[in-house]
Image (spheres, rainbow, N blue to C red):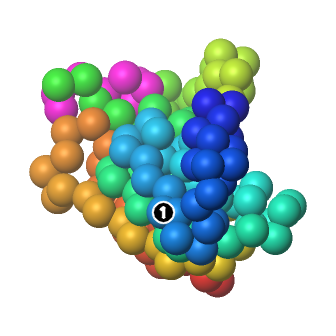
Amino acid sequence: MDARTVWNYIVDSGADPKNISIMGQSLGTGVSTALAHRLITEENVSPNSLCLIAPFTSIPELLRTYSLFKFIPILQPLSIFPRVQSWLLDTLLATHFNTKSLIPSITTNIMLIHAQDDIDVHPSHSKFLFEHIHE
């Protein structure tokens, strides 16, 4: 995990984890959230904060809501066949980066930043995450 390598380098260089913030943007928010979750829940290490810019709830949900050029919904035609859509996503995706399942257990400060007119990640993803922080 590249994010973990960077974390280890910073800590090994003498930085106090309490002074380190983790940031991710768009697809990087899945990696950042996974790192923060692992540090907090498995190692009892709490970074200063987690900043997510244009985060998504999970890659399957991102693909379900994604429209190419804001006009062409990629998986929308399959929405009338939810089992086929789910099977396709489960079969093709190696990782799901399920941010929505990890974020409630992240106990450090969390900042969500999202443009209302984001054409790649619909702002509803951030709204959902905001509503489930520290549940």
Query: How far from the left and from the top, in percent, is residue 110?
Result: 47, 72
Identified at 63% across, 42% down, the residue is 9
Vertical placement of residue 86 versus 130, above or below: above
Q: In this image, 127 relative to 86: left or right? A: left
Q: Can see residue 53?
A: yes
* Residue 76 painted magenta: yes
Q: Which residue of the protein is positioned furthest toward the right in this rendering?
A: 42
Q: Which residue of the protein is positioned furthest toward the bottom in this rendering?
A: 135
Quarter of the image with the N terminus in it: top right
* Residue 111 painted magenta: no
Vertical placement of residue 71 versus 109, above or below: above
Identified at 49% across, 25% down, the residue is 78
Q: Nearer the viewer, residue 44 or 58?
A: 44
Q: Quadrant of residue 6?
A: top right
Q: Which residue of the protein is positioned furthest toward the left in this rendering?
A: 117
- The amino acid type, in three-letter code, at marker 1 is Ser
Identified at 17% across, 58% down, the residue is 116
Vertical placement of residue 37 versus 134, above or below: above
Q: Nearer the viewer, residue 45 or 62?
A: 45
Query: How far from the left and from the top, in percent, is residue 71?
Result: 17, 28
Give the magenta part as a residue range.
70-77
The residue labelled by disc 1 is 21
Quarter of the image with the C terminus in it: bottom right
Identified at 52% across, 70% down, the residue is 19
Q: In this image, 113 relative to 116: left or right? A: right
